[in-house]
Image (cartoon, rainbow, N blue to C red):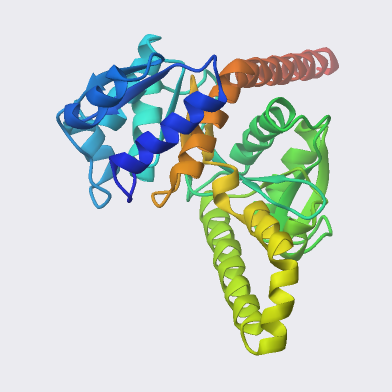
Amino acid sequence: GGDLGPAVVLGGVSQALQADPDLHVVLVGAAEAVEPFAASHDRARAQATTEVIEMAEHPANAVRTKKDSSIVVGCRLVKEGAAQGFFSAGSTGACLAAATLVVGRVKGVKRPALGQVLPAYARPCLLIDVGANADCKPEYLVQFAQMGAVYMESIMGMENPRVGLLNIGSEDTKGDEFAQRAHGLLADSVPQFAGNCEGGNLMAGDFDVVVCDGFTGNVCLKTIEGTAKTLFKYVKDALMGSLASRLGALLVKGDLSALKAKLSPETYGGTPLLGVKGAVIVGHGSSNEVAIANGIAVAATTVRANVAGVIAETVARTAAAKAAASGEGEAAASDAR
């Protein structure tokens, strides 16, 4: 998958293999693309497929009908244990559908969610959900918070990550009925919950995980990405405006390149789909070789950290505690009667 073609994906795979001597990759795609590469790389093998899910196709329908597409076959390999993780820069909708329908949800998870790591100022922040669930119930956000906290602990090395709820104000009473209900559930069920996060504070780094419904999260993420691109265009125009500014640009070229790399989606490689039985990382369609390599690296790290297993344990533990509390409440009510 990917807008830039198989050659770019294979270039990213090559970089990932060079960076990680313990990595083994299954290349799933057209035989003419994957077989020559696998033949020349010891830790890569080819899994030829005959069908392609196009970006414009209906995701669920395509997953159900194109059983020999790279996305479906890749997810099936994870389900069967022939692979431990899956990365694709193909159709996001198809990746989500295949991960849910083929790989399957972790027991007890109501809805898997996409979490995007943002380059917040103080430290990275995970925004979850950013598009998997446009329509949510407040209780879904509790699981998003739990899964996001596991990811930030396991992958980003953050102890006791602070969880926030994306809202229009910091006060407990802010927001619509959905937000207020979600706030109450998060406060009762998530020990790391630290209150509401206003949109203006999202990139400050005050929170490590910020939860929201997928519609809001997707709009928020694309607004951030679009603003960053526009800002860099303004900066470039300003630096190229005169001879003096161009000379100044030469002095800060290295710093600006480092800043661009820090803010670029390529740095994080892809978006993890949390709540499925395996490591599933969804890359941007426009991913270049660096983004592909980083996405594969994130998938490998997610496998090694057993993120799916820890999420399963967390969800099961929460369900057991809730059931025990409910039983105690019923017993108390019975005694009172």
Of all residues, the one furthest to the top in this rendering is 81
Q: Is residue 129 visible?
A: no
Residue at x 59%, y 54% (from the top left corner): 264
The residue closer to the viewer here, 37 or 58, is 37
Relative vertical location of residue 28 with respect to residue 291 in this rendering, above or below: above
Question: Picture quarter containing residue 65?
Answer: top left
Relative vertical location of residue 268 with respect to residue 299 in this rendering, above or below: below
Relative vertical location of residue 110 with respect to residue 238 in this rendering, above or below: above
Residue at x 38%, y 13% (from the top left corner): 42
Residue at x 51%, y 20% (from the top left corner): 106
The residue closer to the viewer here, 308 or 172, is 308
Relative vertical location of residue 112 with respect to residue 43 in this rendering, above or below: below
Question: Picture quarter containing residue 326?
Answer: top right
Picture quarter with the C terminus: top right
Residue 304 locus on image (x, y percent): 60, 16
Residue 143 locus on image (x, y percent): 63, 33
Question: How many numbered badges does the structure rendering display?
Answer: 0
Of all residues, the one furthest to the bottom in this rendering is 242
Q: Is residue 79 visible?
A: yes
Question: Picture quarter containing residue 247?
Answer: bottom right
Residue at x 47%, y 50% (from the top left corner): 134
Residue 173 lies left or right of residue 98; in this view the side is right
Residue 9 locus on image (x, y percent): 37, 38
Residue 266 lies left or right of residue 30; in this view the side is right
Residue 26 locus on image (x, y percent): 36, 20
Picture quarter with the N terminus: top left
